[in-house]
Image: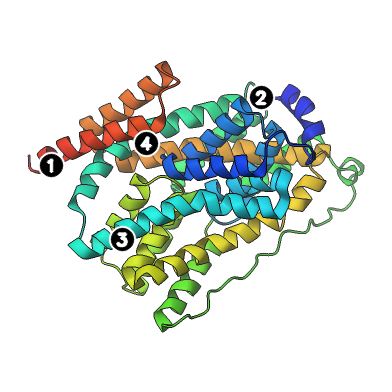
């Protein structure tokens, strides 16, 4: 890992002469948003595999900076990582276009599913599809988490304890703790590149933290749209961690506080997010559609993603400007180790929710084995097979 840091550091702040065009990156994110199943863990893994390893459009250092920023800022991890990668060489226009391209496909899908759900009074087949897809997704994200761990942690003796502690805390609390990421970053910073005042034993100076931007959607026609905008802006601004971290928060608001959805409708909304590609947080668009039609979906999605966009592009220049400093590299290494540990822990947490019997356990193990053995099999093909299995098997299991 130390060798990786040495070679990657000189490129950490480079933002000129990319050997790809902005439209190539936008097309890639549009495709990833259209077929990228598996939630934030898998999506982050796809970006590393495709943009860092295969195409070499993004350096390892830039990717690590983006992953660290996405973990430190509130909002959906995969969407913020995509926006940061767009920012690396094409600044604000790149972050904007990449963010829209990444989110738009799944938004259109959940709007279409929302229309079908409303018209036909529920989607019973959705639970059958999720029965198979949810299990296969565990295998997909397990492989992605393994690849991220092997590439970013390696044999580093300092980062491994951080990784393991973060994974254990994520499993125990079933949430991602931002204080853990910050603490890990400070620990590695002080260990590898201690500041001068620490060496002298001088006073501890405070470090300025990013100020959260406040976002709220104003009413268009209905008071309910304003409520939707304000509530989802709040959710997008103050919920840390991966897309799944927002689920319990949304349940408390849309079911318990406002009564917009029933328990069954909320479970179906989460299922829609899991069986569609792209960020899991797009479930807010489906919820918005059920509450207030198409414009409810638009307002809910915008209110959720605009704050995470601001939390990405506002601090991004400082990450790029100071990215080559040894203390910043050490801090990012610590945050990255804790973030990947949390991602690995999330595999177990998600598995506990998706693996409900021996059939789903077998599907998860089979998916892992297939992707491990046949590395060129596209993930959408695996998801499609799992969906068909779910449609066939789940009705039999449910009525057994």
Q: How far apart are marks 2 and 4 (CA)?
A: 30 Å
Residue at x-position 28% and y-position 55%: 268
Extreme top residue here? 373
Residue bearing mark 2? 157
Q: How far apart are marks 3 and 4 (CA)?
A: 22 Å
Residue bearing mark 4? 137
Please tell me the numbered disc located at residue 114: 3
Residue at x-position 56% and y-position 29%: 49
Q: Distance between the residues labelled 2 and 1?
A: 49 Å
User: Answer yes or no: do the residues labelled 1 and 3 have beta carbons within 8 Å?
Assistant: no
Circle 4 residues within 10 Å: few <14, some 14–19, many ≥20: many
Image coordinates for residue 189, horizontal then vertical, percent: 76, 39
Which of labels 1 and 3 is toward the front? 3
User: Answer yes or no: do the residues labelled 2 and 3 have beta carbons within 8 Å?
Assistant: no
Which of labels 3 and 4 is toward the front? 3
Q: Is residue 241 visible?
A: no
């Amino acid at each position: 890992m130390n060798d990786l840091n040495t070679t990657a550091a000189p490129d950490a702040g480079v933002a000129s002469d990319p050997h790809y065009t902005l439209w190539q990156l936008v097309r890639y994110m549009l495709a990833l948003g259209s077929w990228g199943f598996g939630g934030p863990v898998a999506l982050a893994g796809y970006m590393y595999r495709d943009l860092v390893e295969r195409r070499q459009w993004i350096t390892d250092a830039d990717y690590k900076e983006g992953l660290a920023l996405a973990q430190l800022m509130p909002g959906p991890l995969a969407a913020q990582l995509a926006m940061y990668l767009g920012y690396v060489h094409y600044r604000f226009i790149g972050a904007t276009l990449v963010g829209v391209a990444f989110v738009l496909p799944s938004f259109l899908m959940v709007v279409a599913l929302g229309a079908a759900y409303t018209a036909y009074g529920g989607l019973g087949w959705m639970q059958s599809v999720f029965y198979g897809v949810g299990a296969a997704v565990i295998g997909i994200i397990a492989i992605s988490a393994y690849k991220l761990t092997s590439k970013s942690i390696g044999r580093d003796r300092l980062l491994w304890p951080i990784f393991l502690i973060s994974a254990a805390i994520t499993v125990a609390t079933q949430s991602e703790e931002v204080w853990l990421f910050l603490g890990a970053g400070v620990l590695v910073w002080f260990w590898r590149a201690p500041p001068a005042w620490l060496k002298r034993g001088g006073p501890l100076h405070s470090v300025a933290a990013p100020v959260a931007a406040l976002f709220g959607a104003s009413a268009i026609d209905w008071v309910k749209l304003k409520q939707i905008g304000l509530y989802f802006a709040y959710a997008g601004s103050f919920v840390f961690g991966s897309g799944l971290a927002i689920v319990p928060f949304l349940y408390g608001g849309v079911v318990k506080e406002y009564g917009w959805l029933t328990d069954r409708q909320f479970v179906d909304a989460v299922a829609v997010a899991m069986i569609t590609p792209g960020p899991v947080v797009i479930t807010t668009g489906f919820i918005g559609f059920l509450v207030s039609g198409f414009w409810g979906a638009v307002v809910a999605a915008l209110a959720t993603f605009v704050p995470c966009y601001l939390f990405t592009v506002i601090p991004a220049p400082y990450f790029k400007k100071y990215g080559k400093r040894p203390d910043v590299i050490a801090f990012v290494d610590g945050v990255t180790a804790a973030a990947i540990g949390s991602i690995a822990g999330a595999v177990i947490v998600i598995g506990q929710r998706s693996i409900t019997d021996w059939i789903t356990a077998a599907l998860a193990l089979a998916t892992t084995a297939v992707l491990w053995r046949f590395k060129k099999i596209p993930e959408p093909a695996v998801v499609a097979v799992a969906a068909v299995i779910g449609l066939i098997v789940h009705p039999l299991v449910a009525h057994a």
